[in-house]
Amino acid sequence: MVRRLALPLMLPLGVGAVALAVTLGLWSHERLTAERALRSDFDAQVRQTASRIEQRMASFEQMLRGVQGLYLSEEVEGRRELAMYVDTLLAGADASGVQWFAFAPWQPAASADGVPGAGAEGRAPLIEIAPAAGLHLRALGDDVFADPQRRAALQTARDAGGLAITPRLLLPADASGAREPGFFMVLPVYRRGQPTDSAAARRAALQGWVLASVRMDDLMSSLYGESAHGLSIHVHDGVTAGEDNLMYASEPERPEVVQLSAREYLGFAGHSWTLDVQALPEFERRQPANAATVIALAGMVLSLMLGVITHQLVTGRQRAHELARRMTMALRASEERYRRIVETADEGIWVADADGLTTFANRKMAHLLGVTATALIGRPMAEFFEPDNVAGAVVAKAMGRVNGQTVGSAPAQDAGGASRERRLCRADGTKLWALIATTPIVDDRGRFGGTLAMVTDISAQKQAEVAHAEIEVQLRASQKMEAIGTLAGGIAHDFNNILAAILGNVALAQQEPLEPTVRGRLSLVTQSAERARSLVQQILAFSRRQPHSLKSQALAPVIEESVRLLRPLLPAMVQLEFTAPAQPITVRADATQLHQVLMNLCTNAWHAMEGLAGRIDIRLDTRSFDTHAAQRLGMQAGAYAHLAVADNGTGMDEATRQRLFEPFFTTKPVGQGTGLGLAVVHGIVSAHHGAISVRSARGEGTCFDLYFPLEPEPPAADIVAEPSAREAAAPISRQVVYIDDDPVMVVMVEGLLRHAGYRVRTFEHPREALAWLRAHVAEADLVVTDFNMPGLSGLAVAGELASLRPDLPVVISSGYVTEALLDAAQRIGVRSVMQKEFTLEQLPPLLRRLLVEPSATV
């Protein structure tokens, strides 16, 4: 009986023992074979590592020799040539590890007297470096000959006439002062044409050295990435391995016990490195599965199979019990897995029964509604929907009851699973936008048993849509302002021509003997025309059609000057204060236009006080905006100067704020405002690439916030030219040719210039003027021409005159001066471009100056 029970156990054990013994023998043989293959692979990796380092050092030497050849060439142009060549070198993958290339001229001791740090023989400061950026610039001026280690390499290269490498150096890694191991590669540069056949001759012919700074970590990372997978690589300077001469370590700490290790010695330009390589456990795991493993697994599987075959008849019941236990464990694991999926889902899962009462909600769903999952059980879905959202429709849709049909019908099946946006009410009363996808839950007979809802929080998406709508409104407003500005600029151009004629003819009339009454009326005409001219200037400023000169300058002095000009103009009961930080805030701005901005804003603030005492605060500081905040203002993300002009006046309502920057819109009584003040402010700020916003409410005052892009560099000092002494004494008995298609302007300018003592010849047709000038070009001393004329423009006339007589001064007059006109006039040699509406005031002194200095440009 005992033997019968023991035989089913002993037989499979015996067979298994024999199979395992055979497997052990085969496995031992194959393991030894695998170890030999692993050693061979490791040795190949060591040789490959040494070869890669040698190849990369050879590439660095070739690059440095290229820089050496650049300085040996006669066509070298210094830093620019070096920068262009080095940029080409560093674009290649073989340049990884090189920080910079530089040139250090040799300055013997006789020329280095009194220089701190000069060596006994002389000094070699770095004067040219590329790339010339960041930390590299700090190396400029360093005397590489002063350091003993670098001096030894320089002397070796100088005397041998070839490449030299410094010992281990600690090179700057970043702006914090951290340093990393590296070295310099050095090649001498000798003067062309001098002998270099001996060490003494090479010292006499030495011009300097070209150097390459190499950071060891970058060199090795370019060969293997951040680390050599499976290998611990250490590189030491010299033939000994120690912490004081360690140049590179792929692994900070090495394992105490290693199976494979090797040491190689590398030589470059007479300098030695020690390459110390150890295999890590990852290297051994990289080897593919070998026959020993297959044999071991096959032997064990065979033994197990024999045991299972022997025992399957007598142990069937026990195996069935074990199988049931395992299936139960698997089912529990599956339930746990799905429970974790449901609980950690990023969407809310909401299950309700046929009556709409909650039967399950995951953690995310409870969080969305602001309650616990336990407290949510048994509560109706409708409780959490807004009153205007019918929660029953969600359940009805899940039930598939469309036109009285049940879930089993085809239309109802199509209706299920759709998604709708709904607003949910959280327990604390706040609202939540959600995307709800519902699916009916049916039993095996197809009867509706509840609803499964997948709920996604889309509140952030809705907020983004609102923000997008606000940006679209701002864009439409900007396009509207641009269209109005274009129209206003065109109207202003025509007005300038008319005003120039009015002012000029009135001035000529006032020079005649007149009765006091007539002269007074003419003065009124002049005042009205000047007011109209000022209005035109505001229109052009609003439309951004006037040329402006943006200069890098500190903003505080410009504002202080404006405040000094404003204080006498404001009533004593209006207090004007300006505050600014001590640190200069620099922007690119036109000071004259900024004066106009502050004048308009402070004047509006004063009027908003309606004759009562008040306060105007001007504040200057800096602000930074991220992309989202900058887009709301129509700007790019970055740092800005912030200029705030605030008053405690009456304020304004929302309707007024919406139209605030529209041209000709005003809340003042008729005759007390043009409606251009804030439109001009908006135009000037936009021309400065800035933005403006306003905060105001009825009875709470108003604050205008202006933003201008910050400039990183301090402003350069403006040079103000002194008036020429010769200009005041300019001769005026000269021949001036005036061309204009407007007969009124022709008559007016002719009278103006004749009264000033000039001889004037006028033309209303540009082609007639050119025909006369071709025949009498030597008689003309200066030509003034209108820009916009039919058939031939003023630029075309100036270009023709430049070919006839290049030294003849030409002035262009226009009622519409743009940057494009100024650039075109400068290219063809026009001496001055004048705004036509200022002909009366500017033309006579302008002609005086140009006739005194014909080559001057005004």
Image: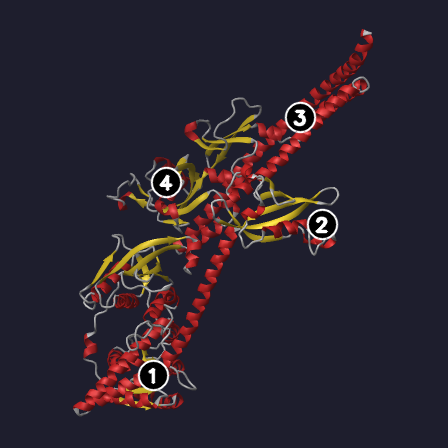
Please tell me which of labels 2 and 4 falls first in the chain. Answer: 4
Residue 610: percent from left, percent from top: 25, 68
Identity of the amino acid at label 1? Asn
Identity of the amino acid at label 3? Ala
Which residue matches tag 1?
497
Please tell me which of labels 1 and 4 falls first in the chain. Answer: 4
Residue 444 visible here: yes
Q: Alpha-carbon neighbours of circle 3 within 10 Å: few (<14), some, or many (≥20)?
A: some
Q: Alpha-carbon neighbours of circle 4 within 10 Å: few (<14), some, or many (≥20)?
A: few
In the rendered view, would you say 213 is above or below 471? Answer: above
Residue 778: percent from left, percent from top: 31, 87
Please say if the residues under marks 3 and 1 sit with CB atoms less than 8 Å apart. Answer: no
The residues tagged by marks 1 and 4 sit, at their Cα atoms, a distance apart of 63 Å
Label 1 SS: helix
Foreground residue among 116 and 762: 762
Q: Which mark is residue 407?
A: 2
